[in-house]
Amino acid sequence: ASPDTGSFSTYADRAIGHWAGFTIGWLYWWFWVLVIPLEANAAATILHAWFPNIAIWMFTLVITLLLTATNLFSVKNYGEFEFWFALIKVVAIIAFVVLGVAAIFGLLPTSSVSGVSHLFDTGGFLPNGMGAVLAAMLTTMFSFMGTEIVTIAAAESRNPGKQITKATNSVIWRIFLFYLVSIFIVVSLVPWNDPRLAEVGSYQTVLDAMGIPNAKLIVDLVVLVAVTSCLNSALYTASRMLFSLGKRGDAPALSKRTSKGGTPYWAVIMSTAAAFLTVFANYVAPAAVFDFLLASSGAIALLVYLVIAVSQLRMRQKRIAAGETIDFKMWLFPWLTWAAIAFIVAVLTIMLIQEEHRVEIIATGVLSLLVIGAGLTVSRRRKAR
């Protein structure tokens, strides 16, 4: 294992070329910079519903500044916040699963629903066919963006090999519990065509059907914790990637400065400032400008994982050729890596064909070409020195 704050950006630099590391590093930073105001606004909207006399923009400002302040001290603060955020989310999901299972078996007296008949009635399982499932995957797979953050945090952990292996393996059971089991409960207790699903969301609909009091408040609290956690991670990830780019000479030198505790405080401040600039653009520029900025990050997640797969393929082949010992081996190499590459390329192609996703591909493509051009220019200048 070779933990590095730049993670896959650094590996792309080594495996593919400087331009690749430069490009994916800046694109990844841009992705999380845009996440910051979006998540802050989502949290602010919930708080505004509770305290309508306080404007949304004030909540957005306070939340962002508070989490920026915590990220300015040390990675320990980030980890501490994420621990409690994660604990609340885990407890909430487990409670939902327990109540849901009880309702399915008719053991919840307050529930007006039970059994799994909704899996078979109103058109049966997959009423709109596999095509609808594949179309939905284009949206749902972006929910998994962020799992790669553990590779960035590895550089600041005490035992990266052990910790990252543990974190990676835990993703499997977390997906099973938090996604598959909870959604199984939802589709078992509520028909897929229930109009309330689109109005209030799946979890609130199920909690209401189970007779749980204050279902909306409960869901809002959990969502508030979730979006705040995502905002916290966005600040951490964007700052660390900018810090790594600065260390490699691909970002302003100011971004590589650290505090006595090792925190890249200027990278944190610069990332937050960039996020505020995007919000400012939303207010002063035409709506189309901000829409384009958001669309430009639409396919970055896929590009990141594509570069990760290509880098892993090339780096492992180089290490095997050099006779190096590989401690962390991927299953079915290289076939599984090639399968991942083919899948990502197929998804990008489908997004380009589908009108509702085409603008994201075009916007991300334009941004990527601009960043690649900048990366190639920087590379040529370095070679000329």
Image (cartoon, helix red, strand yellow):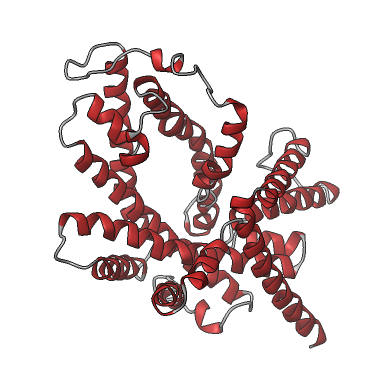
Number of residue marks: 0
- Residue 158 is left or right of residue 12, and the answer is left
Residue 245, percent from left and from top: 59, 72
Q: Residue at x 34, y 21 (%)?
A: 189
The quarter holding residue 307 reads bottom right
Foreground: 74 or 231?
231
Location of residue 6 by image quarter: bottom right
Residue 368 position in % (x across, y down): 67, 67
Q: Residue at x 47, y 67 (%)?
A: 33
Q: Quadrant of the C terminus?
A: bottom right
Position of 184 relative to 332 (above/below): above
Between 132 and 204, the one lying in front of the other is: 132
Q: Residue at x 30, y 40 (%)?
A: 200
Above or below for 331 versus 102: below
Tell me if 182 is positioned left or right of 217 in this view.
right
Q: Position of residue 221 (x, y in %)?
A: 24, 46
Q: Position of residue 296 (x, y in %)?
A: 58, 64
Q: Nearer the viewer, residue 164 or 217?
A: 217
Q: Please state if 181 lies on the left or on the right of 205 as rendered.
A: right
- Residue 304, placed above or below residue 382: above
Is there any visible trace of residue 77 in the rendered image? no
Relative horizontal placement of residue 384, taking residue 22 as reference (left or right): right
Q: Is residue 113 depicted above or below 68 in this figure?
A: above
Q: Name the residue rendered at 82%, 47% in the picture.
A: 323
